[in-house]
């Protein structure tokens, strides 16, 4: 368990909101990471540069925060095969839900999209059920 730090969470959430708003205002695009990644890998013409820069900004931003704070929280106890399977499930879910948590949960909810509200509720309920099953049914972390 980690301590809840509301100030850093508020700052981080605010920065995500500002970045998503700037992308929408400056480029007319929704900051849905799965869609941006999918279209980058598909090499859609005319829109490739900003997508690559956006995606590169994710680890660069995390690296900057780690540098400022003297490290990142990287306490991952799951095995590599479990992480791979989990990633595949997340990828499948983003395709099934036609978007990811950033597209639906941040941008869609802010725009008042009923579809995004339904998707975000589904994400959250599924996450809670998975945590419950892993911790209480399977008896711990995988």
Image (tube, grey):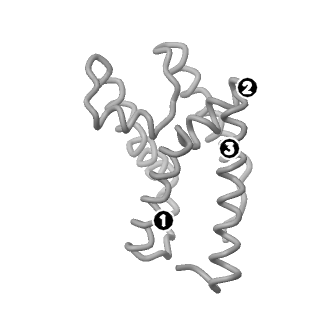
**Inter-mark Cα distance, 2 to 1:** 34 Å
Q: Residues within 10 Å of mark 1 (few under 14, many from 20)?
A: few
Residue extending farthest to the bottom is: 139
Q: Tell me what residue is drawn at x 43 percent, y 41 percent.
A: 58
Mark 2: secondary structure: loop
First in sequence, mark 2 or 1: give its number.
1
Res. 39 mark: none
Residue 87, image x, y percentages: 44, 59
Q: Residues within 10 Å of mark 2 (few under 14, many from 20)?
A: few
Residue extending farthest to the front is: 96
**Inter-mark Cα distance, 3 to 2:** 12 Å
Camera-side mark, 2 or 1? 2
First in sequence, mark 3 or 2: give its number.
2
Q: Quadrant of residue 3?
A: bottom right
**Inter-mark Cα distance, 1 to 3:** 25 Å
Q: Which residue is mark 3?
A: 120
Camera-side mark, 1 or 3? 3
Q: Which residue is mark 2?
A: 112
Confirm or deny contact between disc 2 and disc 1 (CB under 8 A): no
First in sequence, mark 1 or 3: give its number.
1
Question: Camera-side residue: 49 or 11?
Answer: 49
Q: Tell me what residue is drawn at x 43 percent, y 67 percent.
A: 85
Q: Which residue is mark 1?
A: 74
Mark 1: secondary structure: loop
Q: Tell me what residue is drawn at x 43 percent, y 44 percent.
A: 64
């Amino acid at each position: 368990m980690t301590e809840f730090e509301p100030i850093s969470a508020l700052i981080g959430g605010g920065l995500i909101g500002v970045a998503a708003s700037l992308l929408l205002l400056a480029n007319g695009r929704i900051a849905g990471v799965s869609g941006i990644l999918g279209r980058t890998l598909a090499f859609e013409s005319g829109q490739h540069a900003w997508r690559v820069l956006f995606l590169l900004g994710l680890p660069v931003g995390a690296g900057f925060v780690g540098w400022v704070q003297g490290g990142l929280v990287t306490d991952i106890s799951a095995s590599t095969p479990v992480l791979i399977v989990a990633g595949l499930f997340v990828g499948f879910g983003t395709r099934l839900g036609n978007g990811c948590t950033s597209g639906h949960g941040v941008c869609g909810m802010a725009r008042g999209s009923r579809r995004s509200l339904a998707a975000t509720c589904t994400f959250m309920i599924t996450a809670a059920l998975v945590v419950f099953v892993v911790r209480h049914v399977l008896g711990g972390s995988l």
